[in-house]
Image: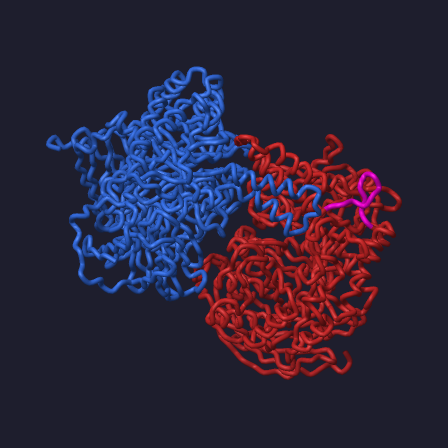
Chain colours: A blue, B red
Amino acid sequence: MITRQINPQTLWLTFGTPFETESLMFDREQTTLLKKTPSLPVKLSLENDRLQLTDSLSDDTRVLGLGENLRGMNKRGGIYESFCTDDPIHTPGKKSLYGAHNFLLVEGAVPYGIFIDYPGKVIYDIGYTRHDQLIITITGSDVDIYLFQEGNLKELALAFRRLMGESYIPPKWAFGFQQSRWSYRTSKEVEAVAAAFLENEIPCDAIYLDIDYMERYKDFTVDKEAFPDFPGLVASLKEKGFRLIPIIDAGVKIETDYPVYEEGKDRGYFCLNRKDEPFVAAVWPGKVHFPDFLNPEARRWFGLHYQFLTDQGIEGFWNDMNEPSIFYTEERLQQAIDLAKDSEGQNLDIDAFFHLTDTFKALFNHPDDYKQMYHQVKGEMVNHAKIHNLYGFNMTRSAAEGLAELEPNKRFLLFSRASTVGQGRYAGIWTGDNHSWWEHILLNLQMMPAVNQCGILYTGADTGGFSDNANAQLMIRWSQFSLFTPLFRNHAALHTRHQEPYAFDGASTAILRDVIRLRYALIPYLYSEYMKAAKKSGLFFMPLSFEYSEEQAALTDDQLLVGESLMATPVYRENARGRHVYLPETMLLWKATGPAGGQLEVVPQGHHYLKADLAETLIFLRKNRILVLGEPAMSVEKMDLSTMRVLAFVDDTASYVLYDDDGLTHHHREGAYTEIHLTITHKAGDFQVKVAASSHVKVKVLKLVMINAAGKQQEQVVQVVPDAAN
Amino acid sequence: MITRQINPQTLWLTFGTPFETESLMFDREQTTLLKKTPSLPVKLSLENDRLQLTDSLSDDTRVLGLGENLRGMNKRGGIYESFCTDDPIHTPGKKSLYGAHNFLLVEGAVPYGIFIDYPGKVIYDIGYTRHDQLIITITGSDVDIYLFQEGNLKELALAFRRLMGESYIPPKWAFGFQQSRWSYRTSKEVEAVAAAFLENEIPCDAIYLDIDYMERYKDFTVDKEAFPDFPGLVASLKEKGFRLIPIIDAGVKIETDYPVYEEGKDRGYFCLNRKDEPFVAAVWPGKVHFPDFLNPEARRWFGLHYQFLTDQGIEGFWNDMNEPSIFYTEERLQQAIDLAKDSEGQNLDIDAFFHLTDTFKALFNHPDDYKQMYHQVKGEMVNHAKIHNLYGFNMTRSAAEGLAELEPNKRFLLFSRASTVGQGRYAGIWTGDNHSWWEHILLNLQMMPAVNQCGILYTGADTGGFSDNANAQLMIRWSQFSLFTPLFRNHAALHTRHQEPYAFDGASTAILRDVIRLRYALIPYLYSEYMKAAKKSGLFFMPLSFEYSEEQAALTDDQLLVGESLMATPVYRENARGRHVYLPETMLLWKATGPAGGQLEVVPQGHHYLKADLAETLIFLRKNRILVLGEPAMSVEKMDLSTMRVLAFVDDTASYVLYDDDGLTHHHREGAYTEIHLTITHKAGDFQVKVAASSHVKVKVLKLVMINAAGKQQEQVVQVVPDAAN
């Protein structure tokens, strides 16, 4: 073991010869080699070439983290596996989802954080086998481990965040509402969706194309019958305010004369099997090869293929099936078919029958199939199973790097299903194939801060649920949460009920319109918070315990801090007319019925049951914090930013920096952004406002509503005068 | 349509020629034929030979009922089907579970109840398609419909309950803790379980045998190798305080010389196919026939076979797979195998591949298989699909009637998986194959009152969850709820983690011991409440809205009234250290840490967050109500009833009738039971106690703790003097 110190908070332990994952980006030259390993918060042991980390857990120890995974914010009680998995049924007994996020925060008497930089499977037994034991099993012994110590939970999380580099920065329009479905299959269908949004006056910035827009699921093709004038469609939609976002899958269809296939094969860019032939698996199109994204040349080759779509006006993509998902391999399917043949005419009892049906069920993503697949890394054959969790990462990196090469100064919308730590530099993620279940609103909420901790800031769930059927109420309540998530997308599966915001009855459409318009009102704040978090390695979502130290804050796992000012407390139970909320301090409640409507109420510290009718979104403004609100429009770029509303809850002093930029380019890196510095002081019922603004700021007028803890309200209109010197 | 009035609250509408389900038991001669149908709360229409009932739902209308089904207590927002279904994955999008319970309570401006007496599929769209519409679709037009009007929710539910006859009365020992697993496979394993309970000093009254105790899953056989001396095992367990409870399945294995099969075939007691041959389907043993339980002779024949086990000392049974569950039929399996053969060597894309795997998945309980099966009813062939929901009912009735014929005065433990209305006269149910998911504690709670409303009182869930793996915390929290359910059984599936109360660590065992001992302390109360509900067509569990009329009571769907005195508010979130509770009135909280330990606290009306450490069970005693507690023992029959504790929360007057009887026979029907009438009055801090007792009462001393709303506590010891004349 080699022990290094990266900074006083961070130890770096190296065991064996780890695979270079590129998850982290710190300067290795700036670390200090320690001759003696200091005492560690975990015990280390090696057994059967597996490194194990253990710790004992007191009754009061909570364990946060693991990014995109199942169960509550506090992971105690479960077993988890970091192994990117396309499992479309997110029930509580599952161990993995699409991401592999090996970061834990252990909140014992002395809290610590731990990041396991290992691209194969890692197993976490967090008080499951024994309620008082943490056991982390790494399925190998070549690994880097990072330990974060000395600090509270938030400081530990930030110490980790700072090792990852700047987070992905999406275009600003990606904060608008987005509509998806598997699938809008034709130009006409897409145009009808756009028309319905316009007709119903529901803002929307993007419409998605799922797998059916391609010719038989071939990447970088468009079905010409269904989309006879694809660039024309893209342009006409954009003119109306909608971006069109096509999907790209990991697998490349095996088909003679299909250029992507032929090129990949000729150049040796596909993953191999044991016999050095391209590895064959089947996904949507039937048999495919998987590009070897760990090979930099293959990565560049695939990434530049996105040009086929950017040339047609496309400005955003979602990368899917990149765990990679495998429906079957030929050998395994043949085994299942053989078993079926052997079963013919038999009297199958429990054992034989379940063996047969389980064999067909087990074709999907069979772990042994991954062991048949190889990558070529720096001239060596590397078994896929050992670096599995890097596949989606590098597919996404391929797209990000390709797009950056094609248009270096342009921001593209890009997010992925599979992910690992480090990927947040290149793109966002969505949380995959959830269900139209009320439980999944809560799961959505509970995942968000843990995903952020792993550096992935642009994230959100399929609002309304992917599988199963939504009803209007679920759609409304879920939207009332998703309006806080950077990615706010309604997406649903084939054969499910239509769940576009206008797909239910008139009363529900009206509520959803108001909820989505409320989202647009929040965009100046959400974008400002996102950009600050991305540029300064901060966090967008935080659990209450990151800011409030009392035990009750840590026990509250159905509320979320959103940026520096807000707390989200969504209603996530069907037919509820309110919910219980814990306030770690006195806050201002805005029961919002739309971008401007609703009631304001000061709610004291403590436990409360708060009524929330279906049309009401509960938005809490923290003490001495400020919320800036914009005027909604039908799309982000149509928003008139000249007048903004400000809601301030001020006990003594509140200040806020509202960040903005062009939203489309990376000129912000050279200082092309604006800030409004707002400071409000309160004393004896009187509020004083100070505003300082960069030059070029678009905001001209701020309409302030300021409230103190006693509920006293003062309104003021302030002109924003850009600083000539800035 | 023929309209009759059963009583001023109850209308009976008959359409066509309904199948005689025997769900209800009222005297048809005592009904009044109405010449004119009064105005009905629902609209009726007939389309394609399907009767449809519709109503519009205001935003404030809640819809309760549907017995054993998914989602919350308020069924709004969902689609449900009454069609007994063996679906082992109880996720929120499912439409049916094992029971078909066609009772709804619609709590609009004028509440009404509705019971649809129809043995085929009934579909309920309760504000799903349109949030403001109730649509009930009966898949036929020969049906009896009962409408309950004029009264509050509780009165309407009781009006329905009274039409069903007396509920099933289990032996008193069936209120003890029960331990099950698929499977304890041998005498030795069973003995080891018993020994572990004794050694760990955890009370337990029953140990279960799942399917593996039989010879190759043949009903009314015992595997002689695994159980060389079955009667000896039964006797020795009973001596130690444990009853052994074997499972009986619906399907009879097709096997030459197996007497049950040969008899059933020879006598024509099996269900038939279209060709008048016994219908063949496959379940655990492979191919089986299904007894035609709708034929009274077949029913009696099968029921008397239970003697094989009662002769060996068995006193309780669970009837399973009686929806009936069908793994596959020969024809359908052959189709799947043919498809697999056709798929050989093909490049299966999304459509072909999912078609193949879905075909194997769809073998289970395929709806078309039920259409191939026929019953002989009064000389006519009746298609099974049309009377599907009566199958489990009549299998259970077969057992109950058979056991009653064998030992008329003996109470047997008997419960079933499939059920319908009316079955509550014969047996209880368990709620089937749930999962070790926290959500399923809540689902368990939410089902209980709806199941009661359908007359099934003896009920409970697989505590700790059947599928997936439990951890110690889940087991503890779930047990803290199940200790209120008449059936309190720990049961888990093959290949899951062992979850017996001693299967975790020492600290968890200690807590579970206390929780189970707490259950035993509650048995005098639970048994008294159960027996009163059974004998007087009452309810054991009620939602808060049955007793409290404010809206918040109706919105509270995670709390339950248990008998007349208690309110259960279990903690059902992992890692929680308490929960929010709504108190419709001031109540006394007993934070119980065991049968006697814990704190007492008066909690005022309103919303509260209450701490509840893992070892603490929250038990609320309602105002002016009394709880009688016994002294736990290792089994129910070992409990010394001579001294009981009484906890009373008295504002002015509280009274309670403690019922007891021999717990084993039906002599209670001839008056062989005891009652203690307890009245406590409170005035200005002083409590007056009056006790009257039947002769033969076993209780000699009551130790009272009486508390008033101000928290003033008074203790008193009262001698119980049996009334010589009673």
| Camera-side residue of B695 and A635 | A635
Q: Is B54 above or below relative to B269?
A: above
Give the image quarter of residue A725. top left
Camera sees residue B250: yes
Could you tell me if residue A588 is visible in this image? no
Left or right relative to A354: residue B141 = right
- Does B276 appear in magenta? yes
Asked if the stretch drawn in magenta spans residue B113, the answer is: no
| Dominant secondary-structure state across the stretch colored magenta | loop
The image quadrant that residue B527 belongs to is bottom right
Image quadrant holding the N terminus of chain A, namely: bottom left
The residue lying furthest to the right in this view is B379
Q: Position of residue B345 (x, y in %)?
A: 56, 32
**Which residue, as the protein is rendered here, is positioned at the far left?**
A725
What is the x, y in percent for residue B508? 48, 69
- Give coordinates of residue B705: x percent, y percent: 55, 77
Q: What span is in magenta?
A: B270-281
**In the rendered image, which quarter contains the C terminus of chain A?**
top left
Determine the residue positioned at 50% across, 58% down: B572
Q: Quadrant of residue A566?
A: top left
Q: Nearer the viewer, residue A565 or A279?
A: A279
Q: Residue furthest front?
A: A275
Near-viewer residue (A430 or A579): A430
Closest to the observer, B248 or B103: B248
Can you give x and y, in whole percent of width and height, for residue A625 in the image?
A: 27, 46
Q: Is residue B143 above or below residue B682?
A: above
